[in-house]
Amino acid sequence: MKKEIQEVLERFGLRETDRRVYLAMLSMGSTTLSPIARQTGLPVTTVQSVVRRLVNIGIVSATKRKSRSAFEADDPVVLRRILERQSEEVAVIVPMLQKMKTEPVTTPKIRVYERERAADIFHAALGAKDKLVHEIVSAEDLQDVLGEKFHFTRRRVNEGVRLNSLRVEAHEIKKYSKAMHVRELREAKFLPRELTFRCSIMFWDNTVAFFTTKAEGLAWTVESKMLRETYEQLFTLLWSVSRTMETAKE
């Protein structure tokens, strides 16, 4: 029992001398410094500083007895009240602290993929945590990079990953119906016709991927929240000025 008391009081924040003086005072009633010093075997100066600390904590009361100060340990139930008050005070400031908390700064990571390793990027995209991939794509050139064997659309649908796609009409390779888009978990639009670029961009979670043409054979990814937010806003802007691309019959 004594060990348990000591451990709990220690977690409460009482030092070894604090506990020693406090436990002695519980059995002494109202007293002065000298009797406490005799009871604990501590110097009066040490007892004085300890008692002052216990008074500040709120578990010992001080009164005046003629020209001297008298001290008495309060009912131990005060320990519970102190903890309850502290809990209430913490509850008040938690929302304030949450507003002050900033997200941890992470170092952007860049990874370069050459030619045949570019398919690794699509494997990574299939693991999108929010099950959504965006792309701004020259389909003809991206298909050359990916190759015919990967079947990205089929794998994506099997994983339940949706695709929002902005496509360069001049380099489109298929015709899509509205039903096909629904079946393949895709929303797609044609970019304005004056845009005829050959490179492609994909992004998901906090990863942005870039692809040049097969002739150049270069692709790379950047893990960066800031960069992803930038491309997401650019995507939204382009989406607003693009047009539907359902060109096949139902």
Image (tube, rainbow, N blue to C red):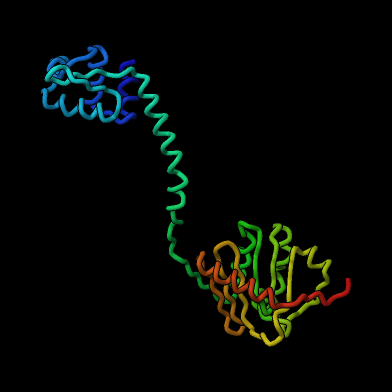
Q: Percent position (x, y) of residue 81?
A: 39, 25
**Quadrant, the C terminus:** bottom right
Q: Percent position (x, y) of residue 87?
A: 42, 34
Outermost residue, right side: 250
Figure quadrant of residue 145: bottom right
Q: Percent position (x, y) of residue 215?
A: 60, 85
Whether residue 191 is visible to the viewer of this picture, yes or no, is: yes
Residue depicted at 30% across the width and 22% down the height: 6
Q: Nearer the viewer, residue 203 or 216?
A: 203
Outermost residue, bottom side: 194
**Quadrant, the N terminus:** top left
Total labels: the figure holds 0
Residue depicted at 68% across the width and 87% down the height: 194
Q: Could you tell whether 58 is left or right of 198 in the image?
A: left
Whether residue 20 is visible to the viewer of this picture, yes or no, is: no
Q: Could you tell whether 34 is left or right of 17 in the image?
A: left
Relative to 185, is 27 above or below? Answer: above
Figure quadrant of residue 83: top left
Residue depicted at 26% across the width and 22% down the height: 61
Q: Percent position (x, y) of residue 86?
A: 39, 33
Q: Nearer the viewer, residue 24 or 155?
A: 24
Figure quadrant of residue 179: bottom right
Residue depicted at 77% across the width and 64% down the height: 184
Q: Could you tell whether 122 is left or right of 20 in the image?
A: right
